[in-house]
Structures are given as structure tokens and as C-alpha cells.
Amino acid sequence: MNTPAARPRGRPRSFDADAAMAQLIDAFWQGGYGATSVDDLARASGLARPSLYAAFGDKHAIYLSALDRVGQGMAAQVGALLDAEPDLATALRAVLRAATDVYLDGPMGPRGCLIVCTATAESVEDPVIRAKLADVLGAMDALVAARFERARVEGKLAPGIDPVRRAPLVAATIHSLAVRARAGMDRALLETMADEAAVVLAR
Amino acid sequence: MNTPAARPRGRPRSFDADAAMAQLIDAFWQGGYGATSVDDLARASGLARPSLYAAFGDKHAIYLSALDRVGQGMAAQVGALLDAEPDLATALRAVLRAATDVYLDGPMGPRGCLIVCTATAESVEDPVIRAKLADVLGAMDALVAARFERARVEGKLAPGIDPVRRAPLVAATIHSLAVRARAGMDRALLETMADEAAVVLAR
DNA sequence: TCAATTTAATGCGAAATGGTATAAATATCA
DNA sequence: TGATATTTATACCATTTCGCATTAAATTGA
């Protein structure tokens, strides 16, 4: 605090932007875009509405930021899990099992995936959200395809598997796990599904 | 009109309930639950709001009726397609290709599946919608599992396939096709995915 | 110390929202 | 023919919603 240019003029913020953003994400993850009001967002983040607008923009902008952030977190996590395992089926299983856990273990219960489960509803009428959704879906396909490609290069890919054709099926399992988790389906069913997909889609 | 007890008292309705319901379904399919207002519903059906309420109930009730109706239509169509083909992979392909068409060919463009794409967003906070979603997902799993079971009884099931474990993967492809269609993804990708899943999941 | 800048807190405003009240229209029944 | 029942049409209502205006508070800069 003694440093001369350490802080800009004006009253300092009394909140941490990252922490507030995490709370905003949780609010949207719970209610989806439409059923989450700006009051809900203010409550969740502990900010008054003008502060919310000043720090993060309007409701739509906040939602887009939430999609961005969750999409990037997802890609990073899936990427790391896919890279970590030398065996393809094991890597796929790790990803699908991790997804299952994330989707079933929300702070207030099962909530699936923010993007797959909430952005879809808005997509037809909101082209910006639709584009973001398509980007995230495409990125996931690409991540998985790259892992299959890595297995091919390492000579570990089962014969007859085309990475580009097979990857969307793995991603499909992830999407379905998200939808099922949000529907309150049983953990055992989801885990069984994850395990079966890892085996079937790796050979 | 000459029959003595042919018609109840009172002014006759000037709309066909089934046709109006189909328009209401389209409205919700487009906007999802939250972004479709009662005014939108009135506009889509051509009914004044009191008539809408009198004939179909409040917004929530209309939405539930829509989910019911689409869910039943889906099950009937999928059931028929699964039954029609003696070869399992061909039957699966027919279902996945038909789903692709339905999801991509909405009256105003691609819109995915009403249930998978719009009910999920509402599910966390609305237990009635959540239960309906879970029912529809479970029914689809069961339909597909029954088709696998039929193949097993006919001695046409590939060795190592457990119908109950395999069916959710087929359903997962259907869910993913719905999400992808609503995200505006390319028809070629969806069709390729359908074909690949039919082959991979039938053996 | 006062001015400038930024944030927090409270209140405001226009429009939208879901549902209902009221009156007129259209049929059957007695 | 008038009473009863149902639907249509128009208007109304209380609440919610999103975004903004205003004032006070907290900091830096001159």
C-alpha cells in the first residue's frame, strides 16, 4: 500500500471479481438464463445491482462470461485427463467419470453442465449464445479427436477407428451424462454408462 | 348438428384444440419455457389469453402438456422405427437419422428436441419438469433396450452386448444430436455421427 | 485541503409479465 | 322467449424485471 502507483484513484472495490464471478456462474447453473433474475445474480454475488453492472456488464454479458469461463475450465480439465493416461480407454473412462462427478455434485445438488443444459434453451432465439454453444461443442469434439489421433500415432488405436468420426460419440456421452444428471437420474446409471462408453468407443 | 344432444350449451369454440396445441408446442420449442411469454403463446395459437387459460390452463400447465405430447410422439416414432427393421444396426441408423431430420427441420429452422433442449434448463428449480424429463429419458432408454433384447432373443445380438448397458449409449447419441442441432451444427456432422453410432453400438 | 475518480447504497422508472375481471356474443335448454 | 352456459374480446391489475439516476463513501492526486 506504500507503493506510489499501486492503486488507481477512487474507492476500492470491496469484492473479489473472481469470487463474485464464481457465484454468478453458480446462479446461472442453477436457474438457467431466463429463470435467473438480476436480483438473483445480485444476491448470489453479494453485490448491489449498479456494482454488478459496473463490474460485469448487463445480464446477457454476465451469462456470456459464465459460458466462456465454464467452457474453458471444462476444456482444460478434459484435456488434462485425456493427456494423463497412456491407455485410451482408461483416459476416456477418467473423463467420463470426472464429468459424471461434476454434473452430479453441484453445490446444491445435481445440475448437469451449465452449457449443455442451459445454453441450448436460449440458442434458437439468441445467435450469440448459439455460436458460443457450437464453439464449445466443437472444441470438445476436437479435444477428443486429438486424443484418438495421439493413440493412432502411438500405434495404440484399434483398427477401423477414425478419430474424427469416433470423437463425437464420446462427446455425445458427455452431453447425455449432463442432461441425465440434471434430470436427477441415478448415479449408478451414469457411472455404468460412462464405463460402457469408455470400453465400447475405444475399440 | 341435428342430433339432439350433439353439442353442449354455450358459444362453440372457434378453434381446434389439437391444432392450437401444436402451435403452442412450436412456440415453446422455439423459445424454451422462460423466453416464451404468455403473449407469445397467445399469438402462436391465435387465442386471446382468457381463452388460452380456459382451454389449456396456465403457462406451466401448457408447457407440461407440450412435454407430454412430444414425449409420446417421440416414443411412438422411435418405437415404430425400431420395430420395422429386422437388422439391429439398420434399425438404429433409421432412428438416429430420423431424429437428425426432426431436429434439423423445424418450421423455422433447426431446433433440436423440445424436451432435451428446453426442459433441462428448467429442471433444477422445477421438480415437476425434472420428473417429466427423467421419465422421457428413461422411456427412451427402455425402448432401445427392448430392441436390443429383441435382437438377443432372435439370436442376432453381437456377443458381449448387454442391452441394459448398451441402450443408454444409443440414447446418448439421440440427446447429443438434439443439442448439436439446436446449436446450429452442420447436418453432415450429425449424419456422420448417426451412422457411426449405429455401426459401433450394434456390434 | 480540496478536486477528481471510482465504488457502494438506495431509490426510481418504463416496460413486461402472468393471470383475472367484465361485458358481449353465441349457443342450448326449459 | 327468456334463462342458462360457454366462449370471445377487451381491459385491467399487481408484481416483477432490467437498467439507470442520484447521493454518499472511500480512495488518490494536485
Image (spheres, coloured by chain):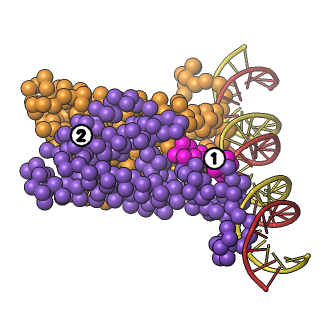
Chain colours: A purple, B orange, C yellow, D red
Residue B5 is labelled as: none
Farthest residue, direction front: A2
Comparing labels 1 and 2, the label whose residue is closer to the camera: 1
Question: Nearer the N terminus, badge 1 or badge 2?
Answer: 1
Query: On the image, numbered disc 1 is attached to which residue?
Result: A44
Identify the image quadrant of the N terminus of chain B.
Answer: top right
Query: On the image, numbered disc 2 is attached to which residue?
Result: A197
Point out the stretch of residues depicted in magenta: A26-45
Residue at x 24% of width, y 30% of height: B165
Q: Is residue D6 above or below residue D29?
A: above
Q: Is residue B82 above or below residue A164?
A: above
Residue B50 painted magenta: no
Identify the image quadrant of the C terminus of chain B.
Answer: top left
Residue at x 65% of width, y 73% of height: A3
Q: Amino acid at mark 1?
A: Ala
Q: Could you say whether the residue bearing mark 1 is in a helix, strand or loop?
A: helix
